Amino acid sequence: MIVANTLFTRLVRNSPYLLIALLVVPVLGGLLGVLLPAFGWFPALGANEFGLFGFVQLFNTPGIERMVLLSFGTSLVSTLLAFVITVLILASYFNSPWLKRIQRLLGPILVIPHAAAAIAIGFLITPSGFLSRLISPWLTGWDIPPDWLFPHDPYGLSIILGLTLKELPFLLLIALGVLAQPEIGKTLKAQHKVASSLGYCPMTGFFKVILPSLYGYMRLPILAVLAYSSASVEIPLILGSNTPPTLAVAIMQWFNDVDLSLRIKASSGAILQILITLSLLGSWCLLELLVKKCSTSFLVNGEREYGGMLIQRMTHLITTVMLSVICLALVAMVLWSFAGFWSFPDLLPQQLVTLHWSSALLQMQTPLFNTLVIAISTTLIAIALTLFVLEAEQQNTKTISAISGFIIYLPLLIPSIAFLFGLVWLFEQVNSQHAYINVVFSHLLFVLPYVFLSLANSYRRLDPRFSTVAASLGVQPSKIFWQLKLPLLLSPILIASALGLAISFSQYLPTLLSGAGRINTITTEAVTLANGASRRTSAVYALMQMLLPALFFILAWAAPKLFFRNRG
């Protein structure tokens, strides 16, 4: 018992430093592993002198300016659209039961992997997709698919659509999570009622009273979304143009090319990608200052109405269109997974078959096994470390203050396309030949922040009087942790576990790079199939990507009910 208590105390005491090391060392080491080749130091290719050859080669690449503009423009526009729509939904449905209904509808979309979402949108907007079938031939007169460029349009509109639909649920749920906190939500709702009692239109009251306070809590998640979208690979790879692609997709192609000399060019591109992300973050901060300066008079001018009803009706329309697009994309993907012969412009297939599912399930046994093993291993490590760190926070708040602030967002704020290449280089330097371990370690960088953010509020809100009473009865800290706190936190732990699994399921680039192409998962196979394989087979893999996290979220929801019912 004494040994167990001592071991538990050491684990708790050292866990914050371990978490900092796991988040900081790989990211900074990965950045170092990109910086050196970018400036010419790559001994494996005989490059032992520092120089700017990689950057010269990069800027001489045809279409490099368009790659940069695509990366910058699509990420900025999609994040801005997602944020504006989020704010409009919150303002229109604040204190309305519809807000929770929209939350329930958009919540499941959050766990859909980016690759699966991109595939679903592709099934909707391709020339022979579900959208053109809905309006043909009765409205358009089309008997053959129209000649349009979607989804691979050169302006990145398809990418913007995909990123916006994926970013919007995340930002909305972040905002609703903030409003759900008692000390914050009650205060903001009380202020909104006061504004309404003074004659302010509900929309105007939200923008003048709620949004200025709420935005401070959303700022870091917004910056994380902006950073992620600037270096996203899956959605631009599936929906974007190939002539040229976004910079992140081009970097991935250079890194995986059989010509190893292109790794120097890829490293230089990764540095340029970091600069693009930093310029995006800087642009967003400048936009904040501009909005703050321009809105000062709006906040204090005493005006009660700014066309609130018109804005509300526009929001209703936007919400309806957005939900319709999501539903139609999912319906189209399900239909393609069962479709036999399906000629244009027929709305439904002439026949439905299960052949694609049966053949795909036979082929995906190894990818499915790899997906589950990697995700479960990663999530268990993330959950255990997060719980120990949060326990350490209760014992000594100072040890965790840096983590709960900026450091936990570090892997999310720095473009993964940049440091993952360097991380592969680190694996080579330490001669790590274990592909599974490398992939689990890479996934942990992205799973750990989400698990920590998911569990932190529930752990911190746990009533400390339970622990105080148990300690006064002579119960050891380890027993309080295992037998008191963890059962009380069973539901949040399971939800965080399901979220961790969903994040791991969706990882494409970390699996591809860290596994050196030797580890096939459902996501890597889905992305590969989306670029040239049968629509029906790619639909099956994309649906499997969605079903896996959905299954674990259902288990996370049902398990506590069964557990506590049996205890009763």
Image: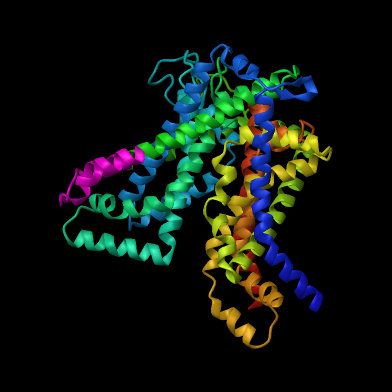
Residue 305 in picture, x, y percent from top left = 17, 48
Q: How is the image coloured?
A: rainbow
In screen coordinates, is 548 left or right of 141?
Answer: right
> Does the stretch in magenta take in 312?
yes
Residue 211 in picture, x, y percent from top left = 32, 51
**Range shown magenta:** 287-315
Q: Is residue 93 above or below residue 44?
A: below
Outermost residue toward the bottom in this view: 473
Residue 167 versus residue 280: which sits nearer the camera? 280
Residue 506 versus residue 125: which sits nearer the camera? 506
In screen coordinates, is 447 left or right of 208?
Answer: right
Which residue shows up at 45% across the image and 33% down it?
Answer: 280
The reply to whether residue 125 is in sight is: no
Residue 398 in picture, x, y percent from top left = 56, 64
Q: Is residue 395 above or below residue 437?
A: below
Q: Main secondary structure of the magenta part?
A: helix
> Does the stretch in magenta take in 464?
no
The reply to whether residue 172 is in sight is: yes
Residue 410 in picture, x, y percent from top left = 57, 45
In screen coordinates, is 555 left or right of 377?
Answer: left
Q: Is residue 198 above or below residue 159?
A: below
Q: Is residue 231 above or below residue 1?
A: above
Which residue shows up at 65% across the image and 25% down it?
Answer: 38
Which of the 4 image quarters holds residue 190? Answer: bottom left
Q: How many marks?
A: 0
Which of the 4 image quarters holds residue 115? Answer: top right
Question: Which part of the image, by quadrant, shows the C terminus?
Answer: bottom right
Which residue shows up at 19% across the image and 44% down it?
Answer: 306
Question: Which part of the image, by quadrant, shows the N terminus?
Answer: bottom right
